[in-house]
Image (cartoon, rainbow, N blue to C red):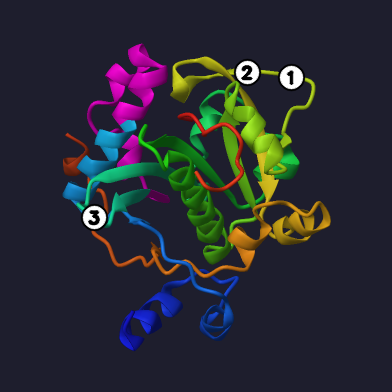
Amino acid sequence: MSEISKAHHFNTLSSPYGAPLAASLPEELLPFTVRLVRNKEDLNKAVEIRHAAYARHLPMFAETLKTAETDDAEKGVVILLAESKLDGSPLGTMRIQTNQYQPLCLEQSIDLPEWLKSRSLAEATRLGVTNEKGGRLVTTVLFKAYYQYCLQTDVEWMVVTARAPVDRTYDRLLFNDVFPDAGYIPIHHVGNLPHRVMSFNVNTAKDRWTQVKHPLLGFMCSTFHPDIDLSSQRQPCTPSMTLSTFPLGDAMLPM
């Protein structure tokens, strides 16, 4: 990587590593890139992999995901896209919505407790990854990009809805139930299927992962991945655009 390219990545890397710290971390290259959707072509790729992922597990619901959704164009929403370095094909996607401008999608189905509602939040939805070998690594890197995006934008809490068996993955990542006694709750934006509502404190993540010697600690906090690019120079998703190797356990299914 050229010095100019390195400088670009250091400048766009999320706040937990400033440029000097990033330069001191061991660097690991990936066989794919993860970046923000910037234009209609990117969005089409994200929709393609999203639909394919849901079709494997929720074929009826996947019929509603053949085109971009209105939520893809909302303020406070970004979409992550993983692409193969070999041929540019889409390998994975995740949509992230903050509550800076409006309530989260999951709040169509439940009322969050006041202690959480009053915080800055980011909900991950529409996760989809390739069914090919390496899908688990793509999932892990998308999660790291989600975590870094929250750090970069000063989001305090990550929030997800997780159906069985995906919820086990979030248990392993140290997410906690928002409603410990409620079990699985029907969630509107995922076809009213029952999900656990789970949260994760971004600012205490490293300490908690360190305390339990989490197997992803080094990958998440002590490795610089220049192929994750969260720079914000992008075209917004306007309404007209909307007509492994790492021990996560079971590969994460669509959210």
Question: Is residue 162 found inside the magenta-colored segment of the image?
Answer: no
Q: How many marks?
A: 3
In this rendered view, identify the residue nearer to me: 9 or 84: 84
- How dense is the environment of label 2, judged by Cα within 10 Å: few (below 14), some, or many (20 and up)? some
Residue at horizontal 36 percent and vertical 28 percent from the top = 53
Front of the two marks 2 and 3: 3
Local crowd size for mark 3, using a 10 Å CA cut-off: few (<14), some (14–19), many (≥20): few
Instruction: Write the start and end of the magenta stretch as one range.
Output: 51-79
Q: Where is residue 151 in the image (x, y as percent from the top left)?
A: 58, 62
Compared to residue 136, the image places residue 80 above or below, namely below
Above or below residue 237? Residue 130 is: above
How far apart marks 1 and 2 lie (CA) works out to 7 Å
Q: Label 1, label 3: how many angstroms apart (C-alpha)?
A: 45 Å
Q: How far apart are marks 2 and 3 (CA)?
A: 41 Å
Question: Is residue 111 visible in this depiction of the protein?
Answer: no
Q: Do the residues labelled 1 and 2 touch (CB within 8 Å)?
A: yes
> Which residue lies most toward the top here?
60
> Hey, what amino acid is under mark 1?
Ala
Where does label 3 land, which residue? 86
The residue that mark 1 highlights is 182
Residue type marked 2 = Ile
Mark 1 and mark 3 lie on one chain; the one further toward the N terminus is: 3
Residue 48 picture location, percent across and down: 25, 34
Quadrant in the picture for residue 196:
top right
Residue 185: image tag: 2
Specify the principal SS of the magenta part. helix
**What's the residue at 69%, 51% (across, down)?**
215
Residue 167 can be seen in this image: yes
Q: Can you give x and y, in whole percent of width and height, for residue 211 in the image?
A: 83, 56
Circle 1/circle 3 CB separation < 8 Å: no
